[in-house]
Amino acid sequence: MDKIETNKQYQDYVDKKTPNSPIIKNCFNAFWVGGLICSIGQLILDVCKFRGFDTEVSGTISSIILIGISAFLTGLNLFNKIGKFAGAGSIVPITGFSNSIVSPAMEYKSEGYVMGVGSKMFTVAGPVLVFGISASIIVGIIYLIFNTQSITLV
Amino acid sequence: MNEFFSSLNIMDYVWCFIVGGLICVIGQILIDKTKITSARILVLFVTLGAILGGLGIYQYIVDFAGAGATVPITGFGYNLAKGAIKGVNELGLVGAFTGGVKAAAGGIAAAVFFGYVASLISKPKMKKQ
């Protein structure tokens, strides 16, 4: 490879490399890995339903299992291999939420178990919870105001 | 065990796979085509899920695709919104605050607990990636 000297050349080099970073291939991998993770979730859901849990509890159980599995896979440095291959296919499912908790926590382990692991866990999960919970409260309040109207939801 | 497998509907899995996969593809396109980081994707998707859940649209996707809609992080947002609405129906204004987290409590608690434990037992990160 030629030595890259100026920023311009470097930018050209990057442009040449990145745009045809195979988006089709990335999407394909994201599609089947994401689909597979969801199907595993569906299988756990069906097992729970078969065992006599109701839909809501079954959903919770399958989330807990998927979260648990991906947390430990991240801890064992296996999840980032899947992530590198599947991209959004492993980030967008609930497994990515769990991964986003464990991976910063691992990095800051040296800063201690309270302010290192305990606080850095929420680097990504914190914003997710802030926005998710806030949005749900707003949805609840809007529903409270309008629930006599025709916007009967869910 | 056979009884269980015969109770499965193969089409549930086909749609679950397709819809779950497509939601991930949307995320992948956003990552590849824009400068949005994966952390922002998670935030965006959870908010979107809550809004679509609130509008009642996401419920159709869930009815149709099952875990294909609930396992992606949008399903987490949907679950929060659904819980908030259920809470409002049961308790009024307080329910808007308690309902969402109550519905998602299992997931949140599992993420905190397993996340912490997994971090504790994790091997230190390899230098070479």
Image: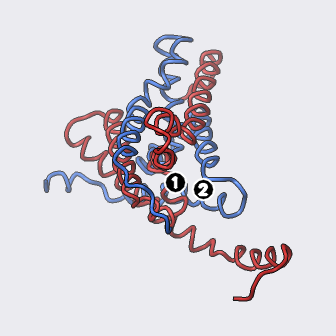
Chain colours: A red, B blue
What amino acid is at disc 1?
Answer: Ile
Give how far across and how far down residue A62 sits, in percent.
34, 43
Of all chains, the one bearing label 2 is B
- Check disc 2 and report the residue beneath it: B27
Give how far across and how far down residue B117 sits, in percent.
35, 41
Task: Locate residue B107: give its quadrant.
Answer: top left
Q: Which one is nearer the viewer's eye here, A14 or A138?
A: A14
The relative height of residue B82 versus residue B28 in the rendered view (above or below) is above
The structure residue drawn at horizontal position 51% and vertical position 65%, both measured from the top left corner, is: A84
Give how far across and how far down residue A103 sits, in percent.
48, 50
The residue at the far bottom in this view is A1
The structure residue drawn at horizontal position 30% and vertical position 52%, both measured from the top left corner, is: A43
Task: Locate residue B23: give its quadrant.
Answer: bottom right
The relative height of residue A5 versus residue B6 in the rendered view (above or below) is below
What amino acid is at disc 2?
Answer: Gly
Pointer 1 with pointer 2, Cβ within 8 A: yes
The structure residue drawn at horizontal position 62% and vertical position 30%, both measured from the top left corner, is: A135
Give how far across and how far down residue A105 sits, in percent.
48, 44
- Check disc 1 and report the residue beneath it: A91
Q: Secondary structure at mark 2?
A: helix
Badge 2, how many Cα within 10 Å: few under 14, some, many 20+? many
Q: Is residue A48 left or right of residue B105?
A: left
Quarter of the picture holding the N terminus of chain A: bottom right
Of all chains, the one bearing label 1 is A
